[in-house]
Amino acid sequence: MPPLRILLAVAAAATAGAYGCSRPAVRDARPSHRESDGRVRLPDAVAKYVKVENVVVSDALVPWPLPARVTADDRLLARVGTPVAGVVAKVMVVTGDRVERGAPLATLHSPDVSAARADEAQAELRVATAEKTAQRVTRLVGEGAGTEAERLDAEEALGRSREDLSRTRAVLSALGGPGAGGPAGFVVRAPIAGTVIARGTALGAEARPDDADPLFVIADLGRVWVLADVPPADLSAVIAGATVEIEVDGVVGRRFSAVIDHVSEIVDPATSMGRARIVIDNADGALKPGMFARVRVLEGQGERKIAVPMSAVLTRRDDTFVFVQDPDGAYRQHQVQLGRQAGQHVMVLDGLAAGESVVVDGAILLDVEANEAL
């Protein structure tokens, strides 16, 4: 990240350029003037370009909201694949559908299923033959035309054939059960009740057990996660168990209170951000995966600070300052000591107090007017 001083200089240049385009062509009859105590008063025609905000010592340890998004709870998520290879013959659901546990999602035509059913038929035939043989040998022994050894051999052969049939049916059961989806059909079923949040297959597509992507993803959205991106500098203040307040785009007029469930131990190399996980009950379904949100950390550890927009901060040589408006409308400079910066806000460690009115828009204009009033 570029040094804060460079960022402030760039912001100042941009603001100055914007003002140069919009500054009124006709000046107010009352020029800006500097009072004996160094304060500056602006004419009304200039003052309307200046915006002030009251300084608030935030009740958040991280005084700016953390960007976040709503996702499904991984612990209530099912990635549905197939244990057999085949071609998709029918798809019964689309993304967004609500399904119950065991509901059919798709049917595959599978050679594996066809082979398993053929094995079952052969095993049933062997059992039937072994049963007839055992019955015949038992009758012969009873008539004195057979031996006990022959009877024992026939019963042993019958037992082996029944075990083979049981194993074959167990395999077939794992492949969808007898008669499921036709002679060569395998029915993909929902392992949990929930909402289909992703579909990765279509009619005619091939499906294999070793496919990297699931055919379907089903989530129970009765509970969801909000994943917040945390700048590394703020990780020390964001701890598991801290209270947060969440605003979600698309859910107007509602704020969610929750606690941080987990803070990652690593920083994502792709975003250079840590991650905080918040678990929220979502029985009414108001929160949808993919929604963007903002998270304010209300409790944690560390000292609370003030944050102002970067547009409020000016630099001149080695001085860093803001303009504060007094109750009588005059403006005065306040030197400030800055802390870390995140997004469009910067933390103020010293130089401002709660309740003061800081110029957050038009500070460059005010600085120009102050210099002209000398």
Image (spheres, grey):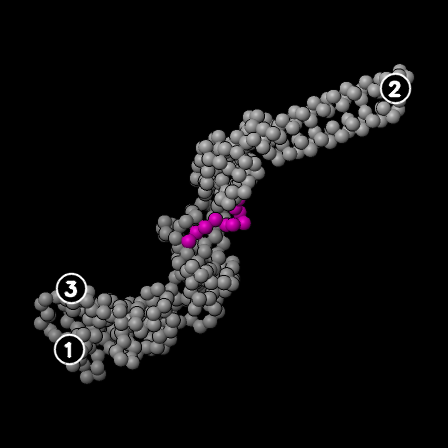
> Nearer the viewer's eye, disc 2 or disc 1?
2
Q: Is residue 357 above or below residue 257?
A: below
In what quadrant of the picture does the N terminus appear? bottom left
Q: Position of residue 75 (x, y in %)?
A: 54, 49
Q: Residues within 10 Å of mark 3 (few under 14, many from 20)?
A: few
Rounded to the nearest angstrom, the CA distance separating label 2 from label 3 is 115 Å
Residue occupying image coordinates x 19% and y 67%: 17
Q: Nearer the viewer, residue 260 or 1?
A: 1
Mark 2 or mark 3, which is nearer to you?
2
Q: Which is nearer the eye, 357 or 239?
A: 239
How far from the left and from the top, in percent, is residue 311?
Answer: 28, 68
Disc 3 target residue: 22
Q: Secondary structure at mark 3?
A: helix
> Can you identify the residue that label 1 sits on?
372
Kindly identify the amino acid type of the residue bearing the numbered disc 2: Gly
- Disc 1 is placed on an element classified as helix
Residue 324 shows up from this direction: no
Q: Which mark is residue 146?
A: 2
Bounds of the magenta span?
69-78
Q: Is residue 54 above or below residue 195?
A: below
Residue at left 53%, top 44%? 78
